[in-house]
Amino acid sequence: MIEIEFAQCKTSHPAGFVYKADQKHKWWLLIQTHVQTYFIIDGKRLVMPAHTAILYPPFSLIEYGEVEKKPYSDDWIRFYTDEPFICMGNIPFETPFQTLEYNFISSLFHLLASENFFNHQYKTFTIQSLFQILFSKLHESISNSSDNFREMELQQLRMNIKNNPSSPWSVPEMAKQLHICPRHLQKIYQKRFGISCMDDVIQNRLLLAKDKLERSSSPVYQIAEQCGYPNTEHFSRQFKKHFGVSPQAYRKASQAGRSTP
């Protein structure tokens, strides 16, 4: 049997949205995101692209939220169940994965929310049937070819670089995350994004530095450290090579531009 407590489709929340739940809850939670979202999994922050689903069982620790400083949106269902196709099915618990037919899956959330709202004669049967279709579609996403999952892993890696450019990135460490050799990572990353993975790291570090130079009065050496450069001279050389001016000259020009009426 399945009993829905709450169900909503395409919810909207302001930027900065975060949801947390301790391990005292007895309900299940299934969500599908519509924006880039972070999840805390085993104490680690994992950033996933839009159209990611995750199934939380009872008594699980839950935390997720938006990461782009934009409005957050998702589909979600909070429910109680003892159905084997959910409790012992093919959808892993507390494991985010990208959905392939996300529009169709979103429509199933909408149908479940509508069916739960009204007391139709065959409400219980309809909800059961819709859940079975929904979980079948989710399983199709998980069971799809390894190429699609490699694509998801590459997208996730690139988003993690974008959101944490100051981390001590290295090709071997990135390759380890994807369980492939460094040479293969460099090849598929370049082919997919048109830039090498380390050049992508450098580009995002320098964009972060540019923003900090514009917005803060911190010394250049501190900004270099904050952007993943322990060596200030190396940072200055890369900054000038990328933007055509030194960090000091860029800050001066930026401040002059802001003071011009």
Image: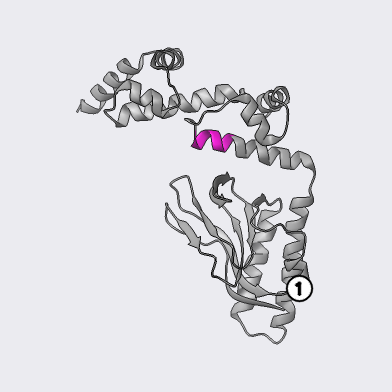
Q: Amino acid at mark 1?
A: Ser
161 magenta-colored: yes
Give percent across and percent down for residue 207. 44, 27
Label 1 Cα neighbours within 10 Å, binned few <14 / some 14-19 / many ≥20: few
Residue 105 vertical placement versus 237 (above, below): below
Residue at image position (69%, 27%) is 185
Residue at image position (59%, 45%) is 49
Q: Residue furthest bottom?
A: 121
167 magenta-colored: no
SS class of the residue under badge 1? helix
- Which is more toward the observer, 23 or 38? 23
* Image position of 112 (left or right of 169): right
Asked if residue 185 shows in the view, the reply is yes
Q: Quadrant of the N terminus?
A: bottom right
Dominant secondary-structure state across the stretch colored magenta: helix
Q: How many marks?
A: 1
Q: Which residue is mark 1?
A: 129
Give percent across and percent down for residue 199. 56, 21
Q: Which residues are magenta?
A: 158-164
Residue at image position (28%, 19%) is 253
Give percent across and percent down for residue 231. 42, 17
Rendered image coloring scheme: one colour
Residue 72 vertical placement versus 198 (above, below): below
Residue at image position (55%, 28%) is 169
Residue 81 vertical placement versus 256 (above, below): below
Q: Quadrant of the C terminus?
A: top left
Give percent across and percent down for residue 248. 31, 17
- Which is more toward the observer, 83 or 252? 83
Asked if residue 12 shows in the view, the reply is no
